RNA sequence: GGUCGCAUAGCUCAGUUGGUUAGAGCGCACGGUUCACAUCCGUGAGGUCCUAGGUUCGAGUCCUAGUGCGACCACCA
């Protein structure tokens, strides 16, 4: 308690021990019982589970800080608060990481075999699995670590199976042969959301397909050998080897009569028909489309309509297979493209090549170009799940902040497509489907428990589906699977639905929308009432932070250098709701300056206050009410306003404004003015030597009581955003007589506004005082008066409020403005600096010999011009009858007051100018 | 192609239902060894609130059009 505080805030010695203590005392742990007994309202957030192999990046830093602010604030409000942490097994991402490690040993997963490989991944996950969670601890997050979950935990796996079986039984899960997004590197199917379109500069190739037999018509172009041909345009010429038709629009006059004719597919010799289909856009390319059902989703649909076969010409690795002509077999798809073009050109079958920009889908995990591929996969029928999720947002049962995300969400649901959920991976939840291999049986078994025999034929030759589920198939259950579902646990009853979800917009479809669907389907209730959508973290050039660009910022490095609080304040204050946060990775000092400076300021202001307060207990403000001085009443009033503002901002998810409001109060009001104003009152001996010792003691007592009260309040307001520094200083506050204090700010109560302490008189008086000091300083700077030179100031027309403040704070004014004498005067003489204050007073500083008349005159003229401009505008407004009759009364009244005051000020300035000229 | 968002100080952004003389942080300039803090203190410069119309007594804020960015969605091969 009594060790001196260092002038620099040393976060390293403070943060880790405090965090350990909070955790040990169980402050972060939620108690379902208190909710179920009706003792407390719950407040629950589930963390967006980071990938188990990931390391903390600034996106986590931002997102988790925002969650912690909400959680800590609600906890202080007395809610039973649960912030449930955990990690995601991240199917493809994790499998890729371990496969890369194996590759370094020169092995593939196939060398190990499935079982050994999965064990290897588990080993890796056990080793690294808690890294990211420890990093989240380092930024101060108050998660309930006793409830940490992993999407591959047995309980969560059970929920996954339950969901699969229920959906299957309901007919919402089916297996089928469709075109899916295939990653030839990861060797797995992907969902539509996992295929990321990227604008790509490509080519549009115009190919000539000769007619197989003679056709009528002179208008058709002909090859040198006399055969007529049709031109088709494609971006992927290599797929022509799998063409089964050419389609044209039946309305297209150019081609209508050709429907039914046959073409000879070059390089293969196959005969393919020309079909008519309204899908074809006559405007694009030549208006004739090659149809490749096995390698394009549209062609696949078109082929179904026309009963055409699909010819798959590629292997899973996207090399050409045995269905391609021998010359192309084994070639990679892009190499094949070149060869096909060469071959066609050789036969004069390549018409031309154009540049063409189009969106090419890439694997969201490895960025390989997706190959649309025909294969048998499992799907979820989404339409029936989407309807209730749409209704939930339309009826306001789930709300998005910022609101605009509602439309994005609804648009996606309105156009939802079935979800491909099977992945050809080894790491993940195995699909709970078995096939009976018994002769002539072929039963498909979908079961919660592993079956031992076939329920149809009784045979035991069962084979489980080799595929695993999309990793998001477990994440979408996160808000309730983590609470024990499908068991009807206490946690589930107490903490579902959750209250708020905090997530970046890039996983709106992947995760947020699907959670809402799952919550409604399996619990009949939205999983959370509010979705707080955060922005992304970008670098100063606006690029998303990423490993490959090397433009990332390591939050732990920031914590090490400036402390968690500096990091937290910077990101909270810098991230307006829903907008991206820009940070310069090349200059951390600058990027994190707001938090760094503020933390230091808090530390020093706190240190100074504590030094003055000493160790002894102070009296409660209520006990010294009669001794409170103007400044005390002012700061107490301001505190109440700050409490109200901060709370309102938090309630509306304007966390940045909340942070700024606290900063403004702390720095611009408490530190800059109140601390300066009370300084003299803590020098009792000095004050007492003036005569009235008893009065000096009482004044000091009042100041101490107020200071402790205000610091206590502001540390509480500060705590959700800057938990460490606020707690460290708060604990050192002297005891207040007759009051119990909570053991920690973590569990301290959130302050309430105190209307009884709001004091318009004190606010106006101290406000006028501040203006006086600032104007004096400004004149000093304007006239280049040396800082050390003491001034005499004269006040004319000083209103009662200002006199009150000047009398109360004469000593402080002398010090803060370096003024030796303050005189109330009714006239002024001689040269000097002159200003009209908003409070109505006139300030005059005699400066004979320093101020030259010409200069002062010029300044006054400028001032007069400025003021009369405002006056004219105000008067014209008041002259407008419409304004006077229609504007709210208080606005008009305010305008009238303003006009009167401006008129008065202008008048005085004019007189002063006259006297100067005379 | 569709939808949405953004455009305010050198930079990053606030500005909540239209209503005092449009704000903050950083940066910049000038001045400061006042016993909490130079990660500080003081003072200051810097804005036709993208453009053009409109609604209104009143527009940074609402409407329309345009320009420029950005994002998301989408089957033009």
Image (cartoon, grey):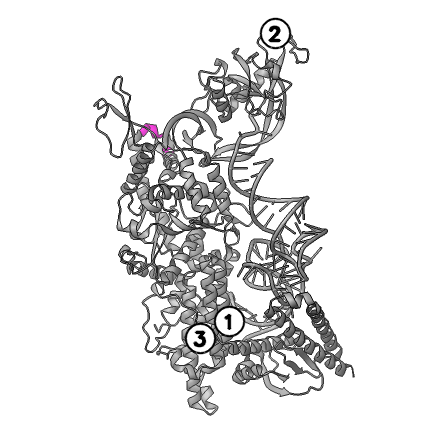
**A807 or B15, which is in the foreground?**
B15
**Residue B43's image quarter?**
bottom right
Tell if the residue under mark 2 belongs to the same chain as the one under mark 1: yes
Q: Chain of mark 1?
A: A
Q: Chain of mark 2?
A: A
In contact (CB < 8 Å): disc 1 and disc 3: no
Q: Which residues are magenta?
A: A102-112
Q: Residue at x 25, y 20 (%)?
A: A438
Q: Chain of mark 3?
A: A
Which residue does the numbered mark 3 point to in the structure image? Answer: A756
Which residue does the numbered mark 2 point to in the structure image? Answer: A214
Farthest front residue in view: A885
**A105 or A242, which is in the foreground?**
A242
Chain-order first, disc 2 or disc 1: 2
Above or below, comparing residue A430 to residue A61 in the picture: above
CA gap between label 1 and label 3 equals 20 Å
> In the rendered structure, does residue A104 fall within the stretch colored magenta?
yes
């Amino acid at each position: 308690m009594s060790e001196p505080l260092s002038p620099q805030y040393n976060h390293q010695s403070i943060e880790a021990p405090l965090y350990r203590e909070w955790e040990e005392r169980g402050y972060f742990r939620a108690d379902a019982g208190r909710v179920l007994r009706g003792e407390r309202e719950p407040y629950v957030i589930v963390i967006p589970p980071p990938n188990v192999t990931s390391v903390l990046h600034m996106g986590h830093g931002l997102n988790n800080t925002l969650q912690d602010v909400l959680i800590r604030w609600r906890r202080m409000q007395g809610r039973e608060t649960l912030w449930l942490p955990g990690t995601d097994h991240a199917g493809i991402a994790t499998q890729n990481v371990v496969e890369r490690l194996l590759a370094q040993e020169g092995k593939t997963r196939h060398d190990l075999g499935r079982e050994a490989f999965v064990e290897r991944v588990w080993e890796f996950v056990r080793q690294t699995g808690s890294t990211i969670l420890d990093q989240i601890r380092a930024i101060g997050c108050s998660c309930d670590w006793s409830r940490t979950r992993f999407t591959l935990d047995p309980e969560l796996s059970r929920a996954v199976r339950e969901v699969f079986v229920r959906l299957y039984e309901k007919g919402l899960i089916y297996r089928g042969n469709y075109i899916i997004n295939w990653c030839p590197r990861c060797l797995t199917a992907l969902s539509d959301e996992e295929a990321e379109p990227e604008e790509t500069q490509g080519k549009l190739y115009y190919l000539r397909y000769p007619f197989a037999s003679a056709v009528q018509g002179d208008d058709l172009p002909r090859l040198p050998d006399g055969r007529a041909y049709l031109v088709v345009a494609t971006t992927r010429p290599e797929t022509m080897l799998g063409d089964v038709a050419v389609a044209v629009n039946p309305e297209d006059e150019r081609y209508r009569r050709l429907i039914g004719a046959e073409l000879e597919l070059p390089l293969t010799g196959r005969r393919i028909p020309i079909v008519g289909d309204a899908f074809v856009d006559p405007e694009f390319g030549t208006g004739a489309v090659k149809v490749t059902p096995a390698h394009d989703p549209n062609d696949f649909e078109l082929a179904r309509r026309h009963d055409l076969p699909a010819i798959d010409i590629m292997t899973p690795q996207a090399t050409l297979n045995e269905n391609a002509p021998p010359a192309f077999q084994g070639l990679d798809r892009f190499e094949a493209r070149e060869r096909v073009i060469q071959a066609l050109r050789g036969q004069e079958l390549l018409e031309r090549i154009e540049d063409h920009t189009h969106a090419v889908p890439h694997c969201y995990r490895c960025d390989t170009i997706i190959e649309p591929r025909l294969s048998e996969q499992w799907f979820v029928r989404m339409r029936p799940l989407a309807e209730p999720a749409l209704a939930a947002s339309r009826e306001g049962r789930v709300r998005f902040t910022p609101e605009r995300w509602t439309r994005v969400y609804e648009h996606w649901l309105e156009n939802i497509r079935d979800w491909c959920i099977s992945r050809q991976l080894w790491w993940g939840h195995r699909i709970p489907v078995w096939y009976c291999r018994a002769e002539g049986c072929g039963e498909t078994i979908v079961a919660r428990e592993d079956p031992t025999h076939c329920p149809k034929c009784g045979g035991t030759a069962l084979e489980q589906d080799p595929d695993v589920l999309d990793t998001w198939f477990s994440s979408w259950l996160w808000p309730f699977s983590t609470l024990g579902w499908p068991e009807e646990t206490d946690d589930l009853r107490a903490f579902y639905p959750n209250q708020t979800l905090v997530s970046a917009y890039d996983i709106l479809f992947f995760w947020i929308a699907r959670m809402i669907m799952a919550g409604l389907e399996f619990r009949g209730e939205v999983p959370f009432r509010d979705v707080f959508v955060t922005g992304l973290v970008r670098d100063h050039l606006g690029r998303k932070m990423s490993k490959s660009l090397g433009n990332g910022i390591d939050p732990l490095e920031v914590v090490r250098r400036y402390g968690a609080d500096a990091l937290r304040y910077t990101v909270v204050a810098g991230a307006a709701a829903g907008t991206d946060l820009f940070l310069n990775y090349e200059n951390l000092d600058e990027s994190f300056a707001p938090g760094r400076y503020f933390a230091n300021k808090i530390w020093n202001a706190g240190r100074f206050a504590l030094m003055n307060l000493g160790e002894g207990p102070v009296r409660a403000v209520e006990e010294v009410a009669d001794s409170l001085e103007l400044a005390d009443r002012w700061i107490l009033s301001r505190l109440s306003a700050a409490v109200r503002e901060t709370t309102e901002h938090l309630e509306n998810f304007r966390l940045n404004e909340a942070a700024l409001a606290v900063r403004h109060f702390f720095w611009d009001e408490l530190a800059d003015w109140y601390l300066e104003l009370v300084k003299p009152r803590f020098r009792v001996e000095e004050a007492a030597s003036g005569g009235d010792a008893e009065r000096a003691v009482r004044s000091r007592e009042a100041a101490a009581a107020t200071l402790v009260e205000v610091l206590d309040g502001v540390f509480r307001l500060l705590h959700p955003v800057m938990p460490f520094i606020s707690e460290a200083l708060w604990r050192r506050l002297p005891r207040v007589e007759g009051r119990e204090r909570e053991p920690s700010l973590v569990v301290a109560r959130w302050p309430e506004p105190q209307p009884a302490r709001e004091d318009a008189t004190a606010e106006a008086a101290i406000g006028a005082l501040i203006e006086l000091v600032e104007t004096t300083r400004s004149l000093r700077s304007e006239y280049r008066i040396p800082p050390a030179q003491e001034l005499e100031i004269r006040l004319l027309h000083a209103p009662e409020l200002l006199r009150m403040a000047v009398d109360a704070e004469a000593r402080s004014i002398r010090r803060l403005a370096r003024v030796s004498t303050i005189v109330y005067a009714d006239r002024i003489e001689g040269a000097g600096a002159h200003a009209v204050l908003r409070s109505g007073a006139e300030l005059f500083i005699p400066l004979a010999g320093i101020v030259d008349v010409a200069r002062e005159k010029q300044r006054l003229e400028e001032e007069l011009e400025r003021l009369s401009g405002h006056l004219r505008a105000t008067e014209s407004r008041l002259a407008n009858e419409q304004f006077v009759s229609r504007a709210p009364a208080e606005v008009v009244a305010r305008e009238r007051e303003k006009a009167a005051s401006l008129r008065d000020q202008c008048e005085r300035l004019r007189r002063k100018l006259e006297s100067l000229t005379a």
